[in-house]
Amino acid sequence: MSEEFSIGFLPLVDAALPILAHEEGFARAEGLSLRLVKDVSWATVQDRLLYGQTDAAHMVAPLAIATTLGRGRPAQPLSVPFVLGLNGNAITLRSDLAARVSPQGQLGDPALVGAALRAVVEERVAAGKLLRFGVVHRYSSHNYMLRYWLSACGIRPDKDVEIATVPPPFCADALEAGEVDGICVGEPWNSVAVERGAGTIVLATAQIWRRGVEKVLAMREPVLEERRAEVEALVRALRRAAQHFVDPAALGEHARILARPEYLGGNAELIERALADRLLLHRGDKLIHFPDFMFQYREAANFPWVSQAQWLYSQMARWEGMAVTQEDAARAGRVFRPDVYRAALLGTDEPLPGASSKVEGSLNQITAVSTQQGNMILEDNRFFDGRIFDPLDVTGYVADLP
Amino acid sequence: MRVAIVDESAVRASVIREGLAALEDCEIFVVTERRGLVARMGQIDPDIVLMDLGNPSRDVLEEYFAVSRVLDRPIAMFVDESDEESIGASIDAGVSAYVVDGFAPHRIRTILDLAIRRFRAYSRLQSDLAEARGRLAEREAVDAAKRILMTSRRISEPEAYAELRKTAMNQGRRIAEIADAVVTAHRLMGGHA
């Protein structure tokens, strides 16, 4: 008799791992039966999780931290035993704007694109008609990545440009209707906008932070504690799904599964592009290959580094104008549960890092790291502006940001 | 008291509106249009906002409530800890509620209860309708299968029906399923049902 685990998700390409864990039998092999619950807003995914209609959820990472810290609603501690992937988002601008700020036919250098955008922003500020950007949620990595990039390029979010929430399925519409000038969203929604001629992709978020945490598997802390054995089984099933996800031979099959109406309900061809790290930047152009556009498995991508949770907290404090406190930084850090990940995968052939927290953005070359089990390397994990995040000094880091 | 019902389904919105119409001194505004939602909220200046859980604009509205300084009065998700049960019930029913801070809890409860009842009634209506549609489709399939058997095997209508029923009983399946199979097979062979 298998234990049922219900998982809420939004129809996005990076909901792939729970879907594949179910469809490819990895959950069943671990004695679990997954029930996937599809919704169309993060608010509803969050409500179902908090009020027990689901056991776990595919979630934008900052929302798990915001929920724990009681931002917007009374605090409820969430736990993240597994990261569902890094990056996979892009910034798409209205094509006339893109033509002014980015090179044709390729992704530009983030600093140069930002400098060119700044000139446009200054014109618009002078004209009293600010540029408007859409992000998928105020507590999303999309929001923090976009803001990080803009401010590092001398553009002040909320002052020089407006940033508003636009649900992913409406992003292409909003660009087309001129409600926004740019969007930062996951796939397949950039590609949908490009295919419709509504915009041009100018940057992948992986260019802003080479290894930025994106979606996580979140659950209520008491559920994680009560169902610890099943949660560990789920971690193992998801890790097998991640391993399978990166198998080039399985791409087409994965895209077809994800495209089914009960999951993403979209175009399998567009989905397969994202899975293969291929992007169509502008309608009529050729596809380009951007390695590690989505980053779902290698280099222990699924390991919930405490430092990643704390970087997200640093951005939350930064943009909400709240003082950084040791207590909140520690609470945010505790949302990510490397201990559960380790316990689940100890004794498997999966490498486990020796540390649970690291200095983010410090590596510019392939580096072997000490492990608890197996061999592991980490590659370039820099931020585009070269800043380094030391989780031991969140206050100093935030104070030093532009 | 000003209540905004945000629902992309105009039918459901009017079902809820009707449910709340009995309340005294209650002014109801229905918003079905996605575009300009935030501006519309600013005009309505509601005390309570009811929104279906399947509405993709929930994140937009929540952001507006969280960061907007357009409204003089802060709006919060209906999250009084003592009302866990009400919230649970509203989520089960498929409706979320946002309430101006400091609004009398018993008045919220009355409105929410009414809304929940209306949401449930609406989903019952929907499932009845789906069931009725399903039955109609089944009857059409059975009729089509009968016609196929009557033509191809030159038997009468009662005989064709008896044949379908017998096959269904032998295979432990429903007549409609057998009828579907007959129609599908017939189409695959190039026939028109």
Image: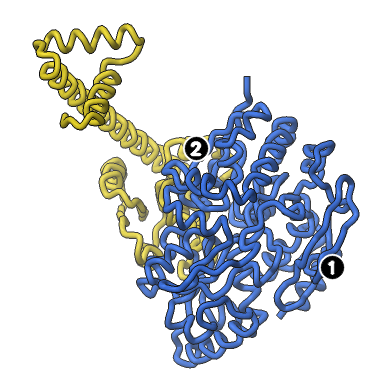
Q: Residues within 10 Å of mark 1 (few under 14, many from 20)?
A: few
Colour blue, chain: A
Left-right relation of A329 to A11: right
* Marker disc for residue A393: 1
Q: Do the residues bearing badges 1 and 2 touch, measured as CB atoms within 8 Å?
A: no
Colour yellow, chain: B
Q: Residue placed at 72% from the left, 44% from the top?
A: A81
Label 1 in the same subunit as label 2: no
The picture quadrant where one finds residue A79 is top right
Above or below — where is A133 with respect to A43? Answer: below
Task: Give the quadrant of the C terminus of chain A.
Answer: bottom right
- Chain to which mark 2 belongs: B
Q: Position of residue B10 (x, y in %)?
A: 27, 49
Q: Position of residue A357 (x, y in %)?
A: 83, 57
B147 or A227: nearer the viewer: B147
The amino acid marked with disc number 1 is Asp
Judge whether residue B73 can be spotted in this image.
no
Which of label 1 and label 2 is nearer to you? 1
Task: Give the quadrant of the N terminus of chain A.
Answer: top right
Q: Residue placed at 74% from the left, 33% from the top?
A: A228
B94 or A253: nearer the viewer: A253
Check disc 1 and report its element: helix, strand or loop: helix
- Chain to which mark 1 belongs: A
Q: Residue placed at 35% from the left, 60% from the top?
A: B34
Left-right relation of A284 to A81: left
Left-right relation of A187 to B159: right
The amino acid marked with disc number 2 is Ser
Determine the CA span between mark 1 and mark 2: 43 Å
Q: Position of residue A43 (x, y in %)?
A: 52, 51
Q: Which residue lies under the disc numbered 2? A: B86
Above or below — where is B10 with respect to A165? Answer: above
